[in-house]
Image (spheres, rainbow, N blue to C red):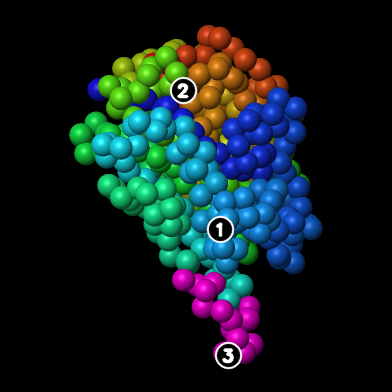
Amino acid sequence: MAVLVTGAGIVCALGTTQDEVLASFRAHASGMGPARHLTTRHQADYTFGEVPRSNKELAAQYGLPSHLSRTILLSYHAACEAYDSIPKALLKGNRIGFISATSVGGMDKTESFFLDYVPDATAGKLTKVINHDCGKHTDFVAEQLGIRDFVTTISTACSSSANAIMLGARMLKAGLLDIVIAGGADSLTRFTFNGFNTLMIVDKAQCRPLDASREGLNLGEGAAYVVLMRDDLADAETALASLSGYANTNDAFHQTALSEQGEGPYLAMSQALAAASLEPADIGYINLHGTGTQNNDAAESTALRRLFGEALPKLSSTKSFTGHTLAASGGIEAVLAALAVKHGYVFPNYSFATPIAGPALQPVQQFHQDPDVRHVLSNSFGFGGNCSALLFSRP
């Protein structure tokens, strides 16, 4: 049984719909800049991939209360776009699941609560903390959309959304569900920024994935979901792509770093290819994890050379446009990968000048279409060595 991607929804620094995001890529306009909605002493000094709408604006579009966490609001926007792509006739009589991923959950509101509460124990509104839990955004969106057959949340750091999509595909193949909306959401918070800054892997300037001059990542935020269906329910002609292969492995090396040989990434990519019965030469484009940190880019590049040798396909990191959206990144990049399969899109690195010594990867630098792109690989690697690869193909 094939698993088809029949629709998608996306919100990120480039826009709040698929059309807006694609327009930004076509214009080579990144969404990076100082933070406007995240309140921190660093907001003007660092570069962020912030969704260009306030909480009030996000809430007002769907008539939602503004006290909801930003993660809930971002998730709901992207999930609605995905949900609306499902033919109404399929919404009745089919088992529908919602699988969402996050790292920070409702941390943005919890931070605000403690800023009020710590100096004055009588201050601080508890409505700010009731949505703190990682699963709250999943429960809220599922309830609003009327999804009750299966609802769960995954949190495996930056591979979370990819693993959510993987779980959705497995449940379809096991005959447990008929339709799944899968992906993830994360918002910018002081907690995550300060944590990554403490690790000294944040670049004040715009990040430069795969470049020898890279100095770290830029944090971003967003949400994205794909609609997965059994092939007997979906129309292959109108589907975006098939999810032809996937794999999750563990580097088993370090809590926050990949091994020099990129063992986890290598195993994830090679096992995803094997699951799809494809060879490295079949891949037309790779959307890299490509964070812009010294460790990630070196390890991922080494793994790519191990697997593909000198015959590398077109590749890039779109995080130079969106920032690293943590648990949402695998979902955002899965949507881009599915669109790449459907339309032959090849997405660029925003900035690149000098390749890394050794692997010397040369990323694509201009958005374009290539009709020969039939299979697209999307990489997502998380702390704890959690490495995932998704493979999308033409149905």
| Alpha carbon distance from label 3 to label 2 | 53 Å
Is residue 388 within the magenta segment?
no
| Among numbered discs 3 and 2, the one appearing first in the sequence | 3
Q: Where is residue 384 in the image (x, y as percent from the top left)?
A: 41, 51
Q: Position of residue 56 (x, y in %)?
A: 66, 59
Is residue 124 within the magenta segment?
yes
Answer few, some or many: residues within 10 Å of disc 3's Cα (few below 14, many 20 plus, some between 14 and 19): few
Residue under the point 44% across and 42% down: 183
Q: Is residue 315 visible?
A: yes
| Among numbered discs 3 and 1, the one appearing first in the sequence | 1
* Towards the viewer: 308 or 195: 195
Q: Can residue 293 be seen in this view?
A: no
Q: Which amino acid does label 1 sit on?
A: Leu
Check disc 1 and report the residue beneath it. 64
Q: Which element carries disc 3, helix, strand or loop?
A: loop
Residue under the point 43% across and 61% down: 136
| Among numbered discs 2 and 1, the one appearing first in the sequence | 1
Q: Which amino acid does label 2 sit on?
A: Leu
Check disc 3 and report the residue beneath it. 122
Residue under the point 60% across and 63% down: 66
Residues rendered magenta in the picture: 114-130
- Tell me, for residue 236, which label it has, or none: none
Residue under the point 35% across and 31% down: 89
Identify the image quadrant of residue 359.
Answer: top right
* Towards the viewer: 245 or 94: 94
- Tell me, for residue 240, which label it has, or none: 2
Q: Where is residue 357 in the image (x, y as percent from the top left)?
A: 64, 30
